């Protein structure tokens, strides 16, 4: 295929750093550096080096005369599988993209394989078990059923027609990958929505247990994988919706604990695994309100962690994230408002980390994001407005990282899209001098700074409805607009000099990139240029630094 190499832009300049001590000041406006734009090169004998950071190249034109839109995508065994929507034809298809260069350092070659096409109903639920892709798909004959693919058209097949009378997945599919087994919730038309398992063969696909006997549905979920077993909520029609466990066998599937005794439901939600064999979740036992619970999968090891808001009122535990052996979460204890809490699973080690905004209003921590042994989040202390914070679980180790928008007023968007890469957290934030731009933190004040003022001055390079930040190793890829080149793909290592872009549509036109994902030597994404609509492109993984854990 003819290779097209778009123009790309790299800039150099100093980073903006905050002082480690004393009051935080408004960052000074950046001096706009000069830019160097490499000209677009047509196919002129040039060879591409995936081990060097070079401009992205077009991988394939999946939808000639139309636009592609990625619904879902997943890496399996070094290849990219994606569900594609053809806007022009309003049809869906399953594709496999792979680098078939056979280790050659130069002149990469890609192959796009159509696995299943011309689907009128959207496939859903891509998951990987070993080297096999599973998904739910309606081929127009069997209804929505379980399918698998080995990456070939002939190996993309129906696993089993579980419900000959209709859809086995009439609801949003729940597919849970185990080490060697796929667990899922399906309705075969006789047992209701129940727990199933599959190894990818018809013989190895079976109902695990009819938890709610007969046509009633136990509706298992949400799930958490705890070693070789599952913990989940389910309703057997007798005990209400309670916590269950399963090892994939009928005998090993049982009620863990009837937390709200009798037919009442405790409704386990927000299951988060911490450490080796401890799962935190929220539940309502009918006495303490909805509070934080823990379980090791046994009845004796399932108990209320602490009644954070004393009495029958709920503490409304939310935003639960695991950071090593500690669970961080937000809750309202009725005194301090919504604040940051931490627990290792016992009442004595469950504590309010810091009353960031003293009084009953609360700082409303949000977007809790693990970074090494710490957590990065946004909060409002009542003085600085909503800003980035960090915590190591201690009061002294909980502090404001940067006052990106000085003062308490939120003139524009607060910091958002906190995204963990290796050793860093990237986010978007507004500053009066630079507008809404990408920022980065390593969990220290001096390491929290504007990545680059991509659209120099107070204008925004990030839209008011921003595209997500995509972590790639120790860097990030995202979509931005610099005022001259339209909305284009950008990538960064967290420094200004390491922030670059590719001008796929030269001039003010936009390629509107989306759906970045690292697979093998490449970072694939969807974008348009002057010759094709939105299609898959590949950027060398070498454009992104190898990160490291932050301690």
Image (cartoon, rainbow, N blue to C red):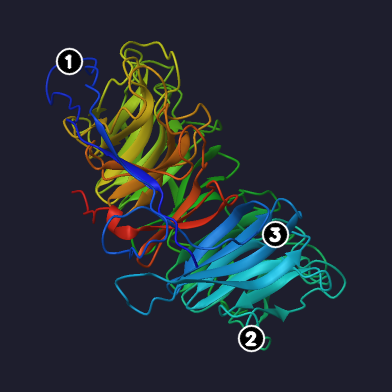
What residue appears at the point 38 percent right and 64 percent down from the top-left corner? 277
Q: Is residue 70 above or below residue 332?
A: below
Disc 1 from disc 3: Cα separation: 53 Å
Q: 146 or 91, which lies in front? A: 91
Residue 258, numbered circle: none
Q: Is residue 304 above or below residue 359?
A: below
What residue appears at the point 63 percent right and 79 percent down from the top-left corner? 250
Residue 257 in sight in this render = no
Q: Quick one: which residue is furthest to the right in this view? A: 165
- Judge left or right: residue 48 versus residue 261: left
Residue 219, numbered circle: 3
Q: Which of the 4 image quarters holds residue 155? A: bottom right
Q: 308 or 220, which lies in front? A: 220
Q: Position of residue 423 (x, y in %)?
A: 24, 48
Residue 201, numbered circle: 2
- Judge left or right: residue 42 versus residue 25: right
Q: Quick one: which residue is furthest to the bottom in this view? A: 203
Q: Position of residue 387 (x, y in %)?
A: 34, 24
Disc 3 from disc 2: Cα separation: 24 Å
Q: According to the image, label 1 marks what residue?
A: 23
Crowding around mark 1 (Cα neighbors within 10 Å: few <14, some 14 to 19, many 20+) is few
Q: Are marks 1 and 3 in contact (CB under 8 Å)?
A: no
Crowding around mark 3 (Cα neighbors within 10 Å: few <14, some 14 to 19, many 20+) is many
- Local secondary structure at mark 1: loop
Disc 2 from disc 1: Cα separation: 63 Å
Q: Which of the 4 image quarters holds residue 377? A: top left
Query: First in sequence: mark 2 or mark 1?
Result: 1
Q: Position of residue 531 (x, y in %)?
A: 57, 50
């Amino acid at each position: 295929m003819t290779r097209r190499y778009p123009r790309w832009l790299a800039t150099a300049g100093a980073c903006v750093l905050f002082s480690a001590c004393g009051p935080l000041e408004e960052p000074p406006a950046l001096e706009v550096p000069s830019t160097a734009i490499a000209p677009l090169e047509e196919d002129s004998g040039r060879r591409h080096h995936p081990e060097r950071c070079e401009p992205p190249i077009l991988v394939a034109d999946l939808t000639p005369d139309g636009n592609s839109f990625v619904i879902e995508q997943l890496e399996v065994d070094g290849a990219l599988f994606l569900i594609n929507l053809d806007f022009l034809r309003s049809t869906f298809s399953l594709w496999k993209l792979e680098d078939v260069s056979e280790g050659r350092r130069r002149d990469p070659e890609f192959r796009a394989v159509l696995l299943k096409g011309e689907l009128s109903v959207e496939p859903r639920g891509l998951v990987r078990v070993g080297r096999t892709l599973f998904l739910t798909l309606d081929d127009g004959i069997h209804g929505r059923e379980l399918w698998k693919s080995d990456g070939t058209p002939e190996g993309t097949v129906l696993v089993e027609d579980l419900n000959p009378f209709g859809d086995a997945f009439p609801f949003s599919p729940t597919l849970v990958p185990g080490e060697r087994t796929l667990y899922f919730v399906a309705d075969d038309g006789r047992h209701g929505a129940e727990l199933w398992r599959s190894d990818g063969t018809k013989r190895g696909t079976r109902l695990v247990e009819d938890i709610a006997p007969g046509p009633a549905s136990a509706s298992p979920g949400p799930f958490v994988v705890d070693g070789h077993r599952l913990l989940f909520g389910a309703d057997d029609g007798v005990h209400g919706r309670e916590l269950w466990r399963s090892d994939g066998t009928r005998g090993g599937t049982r009620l863990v604990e009837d937390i709200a005794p009798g037919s009442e439901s405790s409704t386990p939600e927000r299951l988060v695994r911490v450490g080796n064999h401890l799962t935190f979740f929220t539940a309502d036992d009918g006495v303490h309100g909805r509070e934080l619970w823990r379980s090791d999968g046994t009845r004796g090891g399932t108990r209320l962690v602490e009644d954070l808001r004393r009495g029958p009122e709920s503490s409304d535990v939310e935003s639960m994230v695991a950071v090593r052996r500690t669970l961080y979460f937000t809750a309202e204890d009725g005194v301090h408002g919504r604040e940051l809490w931490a627990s290792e699973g016992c009442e004595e080690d469950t504590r309010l980390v810091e009353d960031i905004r003293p009084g009953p209003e609360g700082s409303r921590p949000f977007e809790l994001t693990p970074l090494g042994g710490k957590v990065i989040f946004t909060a409002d202390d009542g003085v600085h407005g909503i800003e980035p914070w960090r915590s190591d679980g201690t009061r002294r180790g909980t502090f404001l990282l940067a006052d990106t928008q000085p003062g308490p007023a939120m003139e524009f968007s607060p910091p958002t899209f906190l995204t963990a890469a290796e050793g860093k957290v990237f986010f978007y934030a507004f500053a009066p001098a630079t507008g809404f731009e990408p920022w980065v933190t390593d969990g220290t004040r001096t390491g929290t700074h504007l990545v680059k003022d991509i659209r120099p001055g107070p204008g925004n390079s990030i839209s008011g409805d921003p595209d997500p930040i995509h972590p790639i190793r120790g860097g990030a890829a995202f979509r931005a607009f610099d005022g001259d080149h339209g909305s284009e793909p950008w990538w960064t290592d967290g420094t200004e000099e390491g922030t670059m872009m590719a001008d796929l549509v030269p001039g003010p036109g936009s390629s509107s990139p989306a759906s970045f994902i690292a697979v093998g030597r490449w970072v694939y994404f969807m974008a348009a240029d002057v010759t094709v609509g939105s299609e898959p492109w590949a950027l060398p993984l070498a454009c992104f630094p190898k990160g490291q854990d932050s301690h």
